Amino acid sequence: MTDTAPIMALDLPMLDPLPPETQKYFDICQDKLGMIPNVLQAYAFDIEKLNTFTAMYNDLMLGDSGLSKLEREMIAVVVSSANRCWYCQVAHGAAVRELSGDPKLGEAMVMNYRVAKITAKQRAMLDFAFKLTETPDRIDDPDRAALREVGFSEREIFDIASVAAFFNMTNRVAAATEMQPNDAYHGAHR
């Protein structure tokens, strides 16, 4: 499916030609995903910004962690839902559907994670990410203790906070630029 809508409301065209390393990365995305995510294209007006964004994303979402890829995507969607980020709800909702094999879980994460059939540990993780998004000044020792009580390590608590913080930042950039999700995300993994 080819996107026809603009990627975002700002007129910041991709560099043309792209540096060879960036073009190779985009070619891999096209081969593996069938598209180049619009968020990557949006950042491609400045290769240093794109590289910084992708390095942080890859570290948090694909790097070594006690959190599964699905759990990290669940955090992304819950944070994006709290922020009403159109781009990330659609894109990461599709990732939850894909990784879980459960379209209902992807929808619950977008609409109201509290109704999802998830473990108590995942619920505690998402409650923390939601609170960190909505009222970060109210995070305190009992919130971290609740994560420890369900079995999260200190490193995993740091990872939960880092993923939530990253998506709070990206949600705001997506909102400010009116970034649009790729059309292909809407029907993916249903």
Image (cartoon, rainbow, N blue to C red):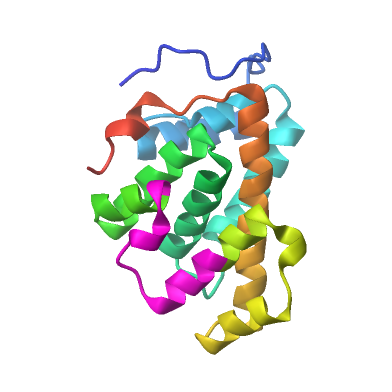
| Nearer to the camera, 67 or 105 | 105
Placement of the N terminus among the 4 image quadrants? top left
Residue 5 as seen in the image, left or right of residue 118: right
**Horizontal arrangement in the rendering, residue 54 relative to residue 97 (left or right):** right
- Coordinates of residue 189 in the picture (x, y in percent): 25, 43
Q: Is residue 186 visible?
A: yes
Q: Which residues are magenta?
A: 110-127
Q: Position of residue 127 (x, y in %)?
A: 53, 66
Residue at image location 33% in from the left, 61% down from the top: 116
Magenta residue check for 114: yes
Quadrant (top left, top right, bottom left, bottom right) of the C terminus: top left
Q: Quadrant of residue 93?
A: top left
Find residue 72 and report its horizontal and vertical position in percent.
50, 60
- Whether residue 91 is in magenta: the answer is no
Tell me: residue 10, above or below residue 80.
Answer: above
Asked if 29 appears above or below 62 in the picture, the reply is above
Instruction: Tell me which residue sits at (67%, 17%) in the image.
Output: 15
Q: Nearer the viewer, residue 82 or 35?
A: 82
Count the numbered circles shown.
0
Seen at 41% across and 11% down, the residue is: 4
